[in-house]
Structures are given as structure tokens and as C-alpha cells.
Image (cartoon, rainbow, N blue to C red):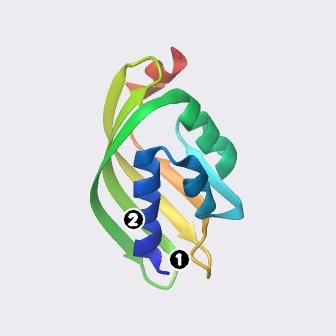
């Protein structure tokens, strides 16, 4: 396994709404840092996301790897349909920190929340 394989699996499972497979990519104590949901254990974060999501469509734009650190960043457009049917689209940078077994220990999500924050509040 390598970083690119992890990223491609992450995007595939996220788009399919297969949160159990997304969480399986994380280490046992893996964390997600989200501008909407805060810092949470991966299983808790993806449970909340699944509850708030009707559908997701992702368009991958690039992978950036920092050599010898276990950190990679991926850039993608996220088309998010919330459970009440409202839609929001934004560009996301996810920074993944991987351990030696290519498990995600921390995922930091970066995007502009000006629209999505209000929509999530209305759920």
C-alpha cells in the first residue's frame, strides 16, 4: 500500500457513502479535524457526516505528497447534498497524516464554510 492507494480508497468510499470503509482507513485512534464538526475520533465524525448527508459527489483535482513525512494533501471539489435536500459545493483540501502502515492518524479538512455552516445548522 502507498499514499496514493489510501487517497483513492478514501475518495471512493466517501463518495459512495461507505463510512465503515472510510473509517477502516484510519488508525485505531485516528482523528478528524473539521471546520464544521470540530475535532472528533474518525468513527464519530463519519457517523455525523453520514447522518447529515443525502448524497456526495467528489471531483479529484490533485495529490500533493510531502516526502519522508507521511503527510499528503488532496484537493477535490465536493458536491454535498444534505439530508434535507439542500446542496452546497466547495473546494476542499484534506491533509492526511499517515503512519508507517499507511493508516490515517489525522485528517485535517480545510474549506470555506460560509454557506455550508448555515445549511448544517438548519438540519
Marked residue nearer the N-terminal end (2 or 1) = 2
Say if 108 sits above or below 63 in the image: above
Q: Does residue 74 appear in this view?
A: yes
Q: Nearer the viewer, residue 69 or 31?
A: 31
Of discs 2 and 1, which sits in the foreground?
2
Which numbered disc covers residue 8?
2
Give the residue displayed 39% in from the left and 65% down from the top: 8
Position in image of residue 119 (x %, y %): 44, 20
Say if 100 sits above or below 77 in the image: below
Q: Is residue 5 left or right of residue 40?
A: left
- Residue on which the image places disc 1: 70
Q: Are marks 2 and 1 in contact (CB under 8 Å)?
A: no
Position in image of residue 40 (x %, y %): 68, 45
Specify the quadrant of the image occupied by residue 97.
Answer: bottom right
Q: Give the residue at the far top of this rendering.
A: 122
Say if 35 sits above or below 7 in the image: above
Q: CA distance from mark 2 to mark 1?
A: 16 Å
Give the residue displayed 50% in from the left and 81% down from the top: 1
Q: Nearer the viewer, residue 35 or 13?
A: 13
Q: Give the residue at the far bottom of this rendering.
A: 68
Give the residue displayed 63% in from the left and 39% down from the top: 47
Position in image of residue 110 (x %, y %): 44, 47
Position in image of residue 109 (x %, y %): 48, 49
* Secondary structure type for disc 2: helix
Specify the quadrant of the image occupied by residue 45.
Answer: top right
Q: Is residue 30 left or right of residue 88?
A: right
Amino acid at each position: 500500500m502507498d499514499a496514493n492507494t489510501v487517497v483513492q480508497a478514501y475518495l471512493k468510499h466517501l463518495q459512495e457513502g461507505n463510512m465503515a470503509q472510510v473509517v477502516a482507513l484510519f488508525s485505531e485512534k485516528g482523528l478528524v479535524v473539521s471546520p464544521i464538526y470540530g475535532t472528533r475520533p474518525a468513527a464519530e465524525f463519519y457517523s455525523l457526516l453520514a447522518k447529515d448527508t443525502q448524497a456526495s459527489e467528489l471531483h479529484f483535482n490533485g495529490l500533493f505528497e510531502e516526502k519522508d513525512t507521511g503527510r499528503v494533501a488532496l484537493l477535490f471539489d465536493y458536491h454535498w447534498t444534505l439530508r434535507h435536500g439542500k446542496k452546497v459545493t466547495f473546494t476542499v483540501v484534506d491533509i492526511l497524516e499517515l503512519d508507517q502502515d499507511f493508516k490515517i492518524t489525522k485528517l485535517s479538512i480545510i474549506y470555506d464554510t460560509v454557506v455550508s455552516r448555515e445549511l448544517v445548522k438548519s438540519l
